[in-house]
């Protein structure tokens, strides 16, 4: 299936403007809950997908135009070696540049890479191009890189620079999967939003699973495992609220499915970090239990965690390819020969310089002897240089052959993997943060049973295009299916992360008290600073200040930054020798995050041995946890009638469920109370006596330090 219609428009962008949209996006309309046919699905979803695709390209190009970032990318200077017209003479012109394999890797120039072609020296953007093919040229002993463009004036012999912009592989996969929805095994389930409830299972089977995993599965997790084994097919939904052991449950599901003979299995997630974490857990579980199941981590080795890089296709090839090992050994042997020759050449150069110095000092009568020595040294030098050049050429050729061999093996194995995936029965996928076309990518391998894991109470997929978001493009497949079958979702009901004082409000407000604390959570999350009056497990601090509208159309609040500093300073005084705190400071506003980072980088550089401090937006911390979370709400103004990003109840849920031991919320109560959700949180904080005025915190801290000083004085007197 061709995507020429995408690149026909994209590669013709006027780079002086950033308001381009694909013509097919003009017919965008609201995403539906159910679709009558594949045609209707493509008609509605394709324009929205193109809106999001173009928004992401506009964003990276806007960053590229920043000269500092452009310099960091580092353009690759090249001469156009050849040109040719594409299959459709009216659409594309392809230009060819030569590059070594090392140069391609350094500049991240691979197939499907979208590049900016710029004018050498000035860095002025000429046009966009897309790498369509990379082939080995025997004559030049380099790679021929063919770049597809829509410009006819990039003539043969002209000089340009090629700069990495973004890789289009994911965008292409999403669009191709979307367009081929009619061939999916689960086509009707996707179109109509169908799913099936998990069978409950007899108590004896649930208990058997709990006994098998020796306390690693609670009842709701064991029911999820049993349901996954016995579901009739199609889609099934598992809701995993914060800290409920989603990864542990998925590991158990995968093991049970493998033992039942359901293979191959495919696990997918919206981020490399999530896939890596599951891969590490699976690897450890299989090793601990002495299970001989093979794991393949699909992805580029450089993009995955070092602990699992050897499980990627590239890692396996590097470890197992005898041909590559032979070539590498030959290359290493040549390198060993090359090194002494290079040393000999250095000695000869020094000898030549010494002889020239002697020539200047000697009389004319003895000059012929010195000249003879110089000529002899020159002759040896020329011979050694030829040997070195020849060896270097052989080394370069061998390295290129290794690279080509690796890619050939990758292609062969990738073809075999595709055949295996086309027989996959199950796909287990955390999907709450995936746009629907992203979820379609693995489903095109004709899976017949899919388990979607997510939490509709947390943040939806991140959508860069405001227009696409307005058309409900951020509605995940998980949420769409859940809307059609609200009673079909299985809930993991026990949390193992938060101190009970932290979990009390979200358990009631977001999860209707279905979520409960695991036994012993208060003791597990108790910390020594909890004994001080001003640093309990949970507290809302009311700060009197005003937000400001800063750079990048975002807000900041200096008073809250200063108060966050006081909290960090106070808790660090409670850290004992050898202890290290894991602290996160979050805010929904990028400008506040930037100012917080600047503030703390200047003041706490020496505290790295006692704490790890990470400052992020709320969205960036979804799926993560910290010992302490300090949340800066930012919005504070006497005339404010809205709380902006804070109004999203899902963002609120994510923000207040990341902390294990302490959650301290900094905000302005008079502003936040204008929002119904935040008014509930403030009322709850007052009722539980976990509401504190910032001015009282200063007093309490002062009294605490005064008392400490008196105690120390008394001890010294005694």
Image (spheres, rainbow, N blue to C red):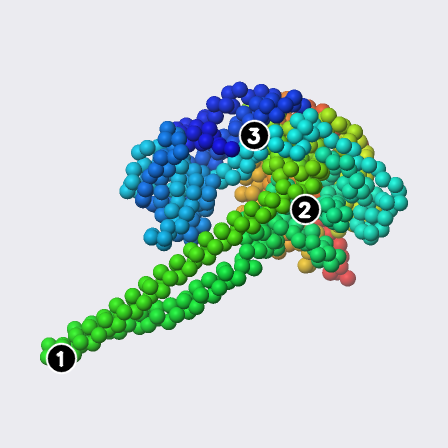
**Between disc 3 and disc 2, whose residue precedes?**
3
Side of 600 where 135 appears, left or right: left
**Between disc 3 and disc 1, whose residue precedes?**
3
Q: CA distance from mark 3 to mark 2?
A: 25 Å
Q: CA distance from mark 3 to mark 1?
A: 86 Å
Secondary structure beneath label 1: helix
Answer few, some or many: residues within 10 Å of disc 3's Cα (few below 14, many 20 plus, some between 14 and 19): some
Q: Nearer the viewer, mark 3 or mark 1?
A: 3
Side of 20 where 285 appears, left or right: right
Q: Residue at x 74, y 36 (%)?
A: 233
Answer few, some or many: residues within 10 Å of disc 2's Cα (few below 14, many 20 plus, some between 14 and 19): some
Task: Name the residue furthest left.
Answer: 365
Q: Is residue 506 above or below residue 45?
A: below
The residue that label 1 is drawn on is 366
**Between disc 2 and disc 1, whose residue precedes?**
2
Secondary structure beneath label 3: helix
Q: Which quadrant of the structure image shows residue 593?
A: top right
Query: Residue 213 versus residue 537: which sits nearer the camera?
Result: 213
Query: Residue 677, position in %: x, y?
Result: 72, 27
Q: Is residue 326 above or below residue 369?
A: above
Side of 639 where 118 appears, left or right: left
Answer few, some or many: residues within 10 Å of disc 1's Cα (few below 14, many 20 plus, some between 14 and 19): few
The residue that label 3 is drawn on is 179
Q: What number is the disc on residue 264?
A: 2
Query: Residue 427, position in %: x, y?
Result: 68, 41
Query: Residue 329, position in %: x, y?
Result: 47, 65
Query: Residue 402, position in %: x, y?
Result: 46, 57
Do callouts 2 and 1 mark residues in contact (Cβ within 8 Å)? Answer: no
Q: Which quadrant of the structure image shows residue 699?
A: top right
Query: Residue 110 versus residue 403: which sits nearer the camera?
Result: 403
Query: Residue 374 versus residue 136: which sits nearer the camera?
Result: 136
Do callouts 3 and 1 mark residues in contact (Cβ within 8 Å)? Answer: no
């Amino acid at each position: 299936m061709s995507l020429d219609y995408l690149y026909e428009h994209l590669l013709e962008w006027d780079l002086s403007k950033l308001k381009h949209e694909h013509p097919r996006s003009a017919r965008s309309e609201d995403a539906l809950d159910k679709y009558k046919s594949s045609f209707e699905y493509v008609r509605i979803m394709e324009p929205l997908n193109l809106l999001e695709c173009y928004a992401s390209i506009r964003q990276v190009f806007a960053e590229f135009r920043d000269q500092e970032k452009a310099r960091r990318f580092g353009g690759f200077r090249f001469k156009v070696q050849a040109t040719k017209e594409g299959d459709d003479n009216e659409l594309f012109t392809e230009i060819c540049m030569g590059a070594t394999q090392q140069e391609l890797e350094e500049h991240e120039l691979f197939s499907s890479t979208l590049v900016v072609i710029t004018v050498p020296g000035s860095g002025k953007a000429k046009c966009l191009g897309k790498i369509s093919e990379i082939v080995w040229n025997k004559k030049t002993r380099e790679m021929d890189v063919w770049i597809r463009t829509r410009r006819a004036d990039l003539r043969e012999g002209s000089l340009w620079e090629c700069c990495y912009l973004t890789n289009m592989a994911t965008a292409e996969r999403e669009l191709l999967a979307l367009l081929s929805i009619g061939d999916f095994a689960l086509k009707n389930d996707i179109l109509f939003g169908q799913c099936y409830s998990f069978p409950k299972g007899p108590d004896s089977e649930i208990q058997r699973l709990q006994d098998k995993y020796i306390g690693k599965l609670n009842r709701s997790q064991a029911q999820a495992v049993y349901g996954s084994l016995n579901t009739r097919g199609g889609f099934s939904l598992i809701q995993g609220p914060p800290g409920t052991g989603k990864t542990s449950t998925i590991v158990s599901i995968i093991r049970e499915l493998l033992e039942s003979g359901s293979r191959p299995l495919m696990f997918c997630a919206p981020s490399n970090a999530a896939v890596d974490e599951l891969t590490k857990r699976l690897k450890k579980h299989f090793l601990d239990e002495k299970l001989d199941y093979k794991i393949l981590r699909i992805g580029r080795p450089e993009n995955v965690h070092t602990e699992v890089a050897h499980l990627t296709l590239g890692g396996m090839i590097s470890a197992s390819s005898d041909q590559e090992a032979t070539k590498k050994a030959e290359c290493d042997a040549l390198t060993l020969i090359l090194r002494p020759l290079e040393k000999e050449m250095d000695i000869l150069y020094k000898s030549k310089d010494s002889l020239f110095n002697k020539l200047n000092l000697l009389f004319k009568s003895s000059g012929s002897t010195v000249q003879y020595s110089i000529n002899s040294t020159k002759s040896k030098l020329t011979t050694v240089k030829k040997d070195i050049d020849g060896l270097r050429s052989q080394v370069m050729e061998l390295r290129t052959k290794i690279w080509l061999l690796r890619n050939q093996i990758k292609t062969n194995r990738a073809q075999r993997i595709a055949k295996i995936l086309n027989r996959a029965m199950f796909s287990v996928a955390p999907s709450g943060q995936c746009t629907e076309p992203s979820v379609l990518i693995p489903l095109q391998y004709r899976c017949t049973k899919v388990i979607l894991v997510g939490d509709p109470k947390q943040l939806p997929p991140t959508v860069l295009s405001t227009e696409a978001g307005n058309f409900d493009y951020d509605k995940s497949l998980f949420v769409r299916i859940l809307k059609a079958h609200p009673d079909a979702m299985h809930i993991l009901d026990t949390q193992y992360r938060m101190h009970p004082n932290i979990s009390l409000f979200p358990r009631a407000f977001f999860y209707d008290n279905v979520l409960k604390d695991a036994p012993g959570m208060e003791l597990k999350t108790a910390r020594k600073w909890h004994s001080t009056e001003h640093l309990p497990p949970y507290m809302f601090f009311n700060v009197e200040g005003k937000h400001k509208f800063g750079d990048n159309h975002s807000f900041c609040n200096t008073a809250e930054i200063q108060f966050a500093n006081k909290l960090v300073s106070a808790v660090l005084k409670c850290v004992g020798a050898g202890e290290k705190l894991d602290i996160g400071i979050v805010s929904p506003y990028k400008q506040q995050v930037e100012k917080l980072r600047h503030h703390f980088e200047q003041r706490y550089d020496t505290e790295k041995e006692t704490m790890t401090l990470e400052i992020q937006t709320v969205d960036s911390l979804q799926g993560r946890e910290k010992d302490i979370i300090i949340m800066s709400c930012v919005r504070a103004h006497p005339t404010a009638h809205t709380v902006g990003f804070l109004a999203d109840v899902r963002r609120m849920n994510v923000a207040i469920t990341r902390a294990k031991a302490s959650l301290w919320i900094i905000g302005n109560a008079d502003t936040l109370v204008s929002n119904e959700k935040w008014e509930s949180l403030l009322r709850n904080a007052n009722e539980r006596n976990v509401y504190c005025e910032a001015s009282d915190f200063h007093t309490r801290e002062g009294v605490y330090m005064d008392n400490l000083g008196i105690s120390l004085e008394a001890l010294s007197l005694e």
